[in-house]
Amino acid sequence: MSILKIKNLNFSYNNNKKVLNDINIEFEKGKIYGIFGKSGAGKSTLLSLLAGLEKTKDGDILYNDMDVDNISREKYRSTVVGIIFQSYNLLYKYTPLENVILSMNIAGIKNINKKEKALELLNKVHINEEKANSKVLHLSGGEMQRVAIARALSTSAEIILADEPTGNLDKANEDEIITILKNLAHKEDKCVIVVSHSENVKNMVDKVFYLENGKILDN
Amino acid sequence: MNTGDFTVIAYSDSSYNEDFIKGNKKIVEGEMLSPDDTSYKIVISEELADENDINIGDKIEFKNTNDESITYTLEVSGIYSIENETSDNMGSRMMPNSTNQIYSNLTVLNKIIDDDGTSEDNFKVMQNVTAAYYVDYENIDKFEEEVKDLGISDYYKVMTNEEEVTSTLNPIKNISSFSKTFLIITFVVGITILTIINLFNIRERKYEIGVLRAIGMTKLKITLQLVTETVMITIISLIVGITAGTLLAQPVTNYMLKNEIENYEIEATNMEENFGSKEFGMMRGPKNKPNDMNNNISYVDELKAEIDSNIIITLSFATIVLTALSSSVAVLYINKYEPNKILQNRE
């Protein structure tokens, strides 16, 4: 059963040229999806709509058959989806541990030891306690992206959305990130959707969608 | 009064004597005659004294030019120098030469007028009729009205020494005026700076706001968090400010009051020097005032400065409200942007 559905989705910014044209896709839990295409094809716009960072104007996005527009966007972003950005978007004045705990606080998670849970998540993405307590700015790009993944997982979101998660990383780090994301789908039953240019990512995802001029080529 | 080669000047009130008040003329020997003086004494110019070898205490005999049988023997009690020539004392048809201007008192002047038998219209007469009444300060306005209602002629003018009474508070008034102006300027500049700083501060944190909103924090929570942070900083600043203000209020007030009084005293000393007598030292204030009202002024030289709880509460409330408002405006300005836009612009 699909957890996320896109139905007849059209989108344009300020009523100009269509960025997305009649998109229909279904995503299931336990799978990792890849959305590929040239720059300007509409990949990031599609991911922004799935993440609730943009509002749909024409067409629907359904989460468990519920229209996302009917859910508070803040609640949707803090509890339903976990977002991983290409440029990490961590809060640099905090430590990795604080970044993860802050995400839990925003999601309103209670009745658990947040520090313990955050350290466990950071450990899962290979960030040890020492690094977890150092400033984010002292981390490498690969480490920052792993912290971003831990933050996305901290709210127990069922859907993980990753926008070019390996775009700023070298090959070794890219492999590591892809493995983590793949495990999230296959071992933790998450629905992982990755937007990327990378051939390496393309080879490791369960299903590939190609976007060209706002349309899905292989639907 | 101008007669023959000399001009005889007398004042019923020393505050009319502008040449001496302004320092155009200055007593160099002896002293100026008091308006109350009734003796046959005069004050002459230094040049007149030098040319005729006249000293303090010498007696000079003057003849009435209209009737040379009438003479006046006047004793020199003071000699003045001319510091600045003004249009009034440089010489004219009525007042031929400032060095020939002789200062005396109303007794001498009236005697000359009486002997001359000429209409007063031919003379430059500056004379006041004084009748002093003591009225409560609160009833001054009422007193003036009552006197007018009683039918006093328009020839007479009712004057009060209200300004003299209130002049004892002049240093405090000046400080108060300065403080109020300073407070208004500080407030206006403070609000402007506070808003600009908040705007810059929030703009600096635009990325943080974008991230927080992207991961699901509500606009309200972000606004509350940032406003709370700013208000907390304001409260700390207030505590520091109020503590410093409480400690410094009295010394600063004392210092300002001391300076103000010193300025008044310097002016009084200048008067003493110009008129050559301490009697004129405290003569400041308005013209057209009866001479017996020119008493020594004792300025208020103690002012208790304290910051009471009402001031603290008002100040704190105003500051916190202004801070909250200015930071809210700044946060609302940033919150109008979608998180995606904030983060994309950064990337």
Image (cartoon, rainbow, N blue to C red):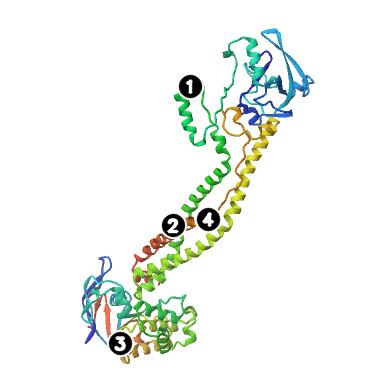
Residue B152, disc: 1
Disc 2 versus disc 4: distance between alpha carbons? 16 Å
Name the secondary structure under disc 1.
loop
Which class describes the residues within 10 Å of circle 1: few (<14), some (14-19), or many (20+)? few
Disc 1 versus disc 4: distance between alpha carbons? 50 Å
Dividing the picture into quadrants, the one containing residue B263 is top right
Whether label 4 touches label 3, CB < 8 Å: no
Residue A190, disc: 3
Amino acid at circle 3: Lys
Residue at which label 4 appears: B307
Residue B29 vertical position relative to residue B202 in the rendered view, above or below: above
Total labels: the figure holds 4
For discs 2 and 1, the disc positioned in front in the rendered view: 1
For discs 2 and 3, the disc positioned in front in the rendered view: 2
Disc 2 versus disc 3: distance between alpha carbons? 52 Å
Nearer to me, B303 or B317: B303
Do marks 4 and 3 both belong to one polypeptide chain?
no
Name the secondary structure under disc 4.
loop
Q: Position of residue B34 (x, y in %)?
A: 67, 26
Residue B116, disc: none
Q: Chain of mark 3?
A: A
Residue at which label 2 appears: B318
